[in-house]
């Protein structure tokens, strides 16, 4: 009986080794892929970034100016403000404000002050603290964890929202 078991184990190992591509060089043998060519990296000098530059070229804002309470001084809707529904805001957005270029994500999960939102890659504490969004008419409000309004935006084209942060800096959400 032991002899038959040993023979079965040896036979199964031989069959297993014969079926392995590593040991065969037949027509089914897969040759290794060549390395993927890459383009060389260029070098040069870059202009220094101006942290106070307006990415939209519309205004210059004093970064040392006191924050404006947007709840008591709402931004007037632009003449071309478009109708917005909650589902129009769902998903990922590119967020640009001041020197920040990062991502914002919005869901319909209820959260204090509206619905759940979060950001990724924002350097400004105000923008990285966004945790909620709400829709009031055509106005989109971005809020922090304590429910304070961080920014007010309006849609001026499908997939694009523009407005101002609480400190008066222009802000944009685009797809």
Image: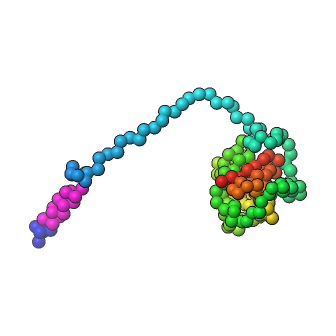
- Does residue 53 appear in the picture of this structure? yes
Seen as rendered, the residue at the extreme right is 72
Q: Nearer the viewer, residue 164 or 88?
A: 88
Image quarter of the N terminus: bottom left
State left or right for residue 75 relative to residue 96: right
State left or right for residue 32 relative to residue 8: right
Q: Image quadrant of residue 58?
A: top right
Q: Nearer the viewer, residue 115 or 153?
A: 153
- Does residue 112 appear in the picture of this structure? no
Rendered location of residue 79, percent (x, y) = 84, 55
State left or right for residue 171 relative to residue 4: right
- Per the rendered image, the range of residues in magenta is 6-20
Q: Image quadrant of residue 54?
A: top right
Rendered location of residue 147, percent (x, y) = 78, 60
Rendered location of residue 158, percent (x, y) = 70, 57
Please report the residue visible at 11 percent of the width from the left and 69 percent of the height from the top: 4
State left or right for residue 13 relative to residue 90: left
């Amino acid at each position: 009986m032991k002899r038959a078991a040993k023979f079965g184990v040896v036979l199964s190992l031989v069959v297993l080794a014969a079926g392995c591509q590593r040991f065969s060089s037949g027509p089914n043998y897969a040759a290794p892929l060549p390395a993927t060519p890459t383009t060389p990296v260029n070098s040069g000098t870059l202009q220094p970034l101006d942290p106070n530059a307006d990415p939209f070229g519309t205004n210059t804002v004093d970064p040392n100016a006191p924050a404006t309470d947007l709840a008591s001084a709402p931004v007037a809707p632009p003449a071309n403000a478009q109708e917005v529904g909650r589902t129009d805001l769902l998903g990922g957005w590119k967020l640009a404000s001041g020197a920040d270029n990062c991502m914002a994500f919005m869901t319909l999960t209820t959260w204090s002050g509206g619905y759940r939102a979060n950001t990724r890659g924002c350097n400004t504490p105000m923008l990285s603290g966004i945790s909620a969004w709400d829709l009031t008419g055509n106005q989109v409000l971005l809020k922090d964890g304590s429910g304070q309004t961080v920014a007010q935006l309006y849609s001026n084209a499908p997939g694009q929202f523009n407005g101002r942060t609480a400190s008066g800096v222009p802000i944009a959400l685009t797809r």
